[in-house]
Image: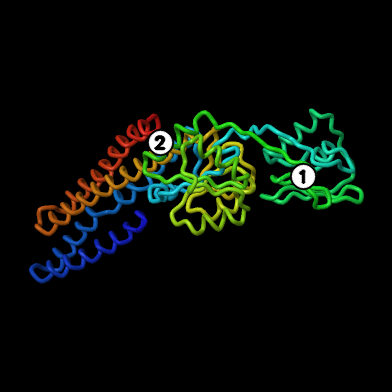
Amino acid sequence: MCIRDRSYYFILSVFFIGLVLFTKTLVSHDLKYAIEQTLTLLIITCPCALALATPLAFTTSLSRLAKNGVLIKNDSILQKITELKTIFFDKTGTLTLGEIEISDFKLLQKTSYSIFDIILSLEKNSKHPVARSLVKYARVNNATEIDSIIVLEIPGIGVKAKIGKHDYKISQNGIYENNHLVATYKIKDTLRNDTIESLNKIKELGYSINIISGDLKDNVLDIAGQIGLDPLSVHAQISPEEKSRIIKNSSSSIMVGDGANDAIALTHADVGVAVYGSMDISLKASDVFLSTPGISAIPKLITVSKETMKIIKRNLVLSLIYNLLSVIGVFMGVISPLAAAIIMPLSSLTIFISTQIGTKELRQAWKS
């Protein structure tokens, strides 16, 4: 049950108790006294403190996160994060720097146009890290752009175009001319400095980690080996649609990514996190945006979310204890309407002080 929904049941309970009190007092006393006692109950059990318990804590946490570069679209995301236990990470640009280099290039057969001219012409407008590395490699090899061609980019698959009478396609498996493989290449990428430490902290917080990537399996397994991840937790060489299907079939999951290939998966995850440098489509699909490079903010986001829920639960307990004691006092006839009006604001003050103490706890949670 969402914590906010409990206020609804609280108000219903107060009105029910008020009806019971009114009936009980009317039987044993007169109408005037029954009304007076019922009003006393309604005054002293005013849900102000309960209403403050959740939004005040959420507002404090969202402010703390925003100051540290974590932007959240909806405060309910904090509660969701504490309930989820599986995190899927995209590889390129998320766990790695995304500064891909071509480590090996092989021309298998001669092409009708210069292979480097083909690469430059097809990949020049793509924002994918692999495409950028291919363009850089082509320029180093004195590539010249071929004019007047229409390039089609298919997320998760590659690019293709017609040049003269020939069809060309570049994918992660290689470069094709008229559906014949004419060149292959290998890439290398580097882990971000904070990746291993951040993932270890996430594991310590009780979350299961998976990699989900459209890159070649060998490349993804290499990164998985560097971070000490079980190969069974690796999903490689998959399309954006397959990413979405895997996320859908995984209940209670968080998806972390940055590219157009991740947008559908981010949408279907319980919580979608777009990292620094994400494409616009990923930003729109996500629930959380990290405005600083790397994933070091994620374990801190999880910790702050857990601390926030602790503060909220503490505030709720304080509010309910106050109201329970107040109801007992009214039923015993020891609290008058005037006394209720004086005592009632104390509950809100208690919640405010509790949240201020929580602010220090949140600050410490972020630093840890």
Tell me the quarter of the picture where residue 200 sits.
top left
Residue 76, how many percent across, how many down?
A: 43, 50
Quadrant position of the N terminus in the picture? bottom left
What residue is shown with label 2?
201
Residue 305, how many percent across, how many down?
A: 39, 43
Q: How is the image coloured?
A: rainbow
202 on left or right of 231: left
196 on left or right of 138: left
Outermost residue, right side: 164
Residue 239, how many percent across, how many down?
A: 63, 53
In front: label 1 or label 2: 1
The one nearer the camera, 366 or 91, is 91
Q: Look at the picture and state if 28 lies above or below 44.
A: below
- Amino acid identity at mark 1: Ile
Q: Which residue is drawn at the image coordinates 53% and 38% (left, top)?
A: 290
Crowd band around label 1 with a 10 angstrom C-alpha radius: few (<14), some (14–19), many (20+): many
Quadrant position of the C terminus in the picture? top left
The one nearer the camera, 23 or 196, is 196
Helix, strand or loop status at disc 2: helix
What residue is shown with label 1?
175
Would residue 273 be seen by someone viewing this image from the given angle?
no
Q: Which residue is drawn at the image coordinates 32% and 37% (left, top)?
A: 358
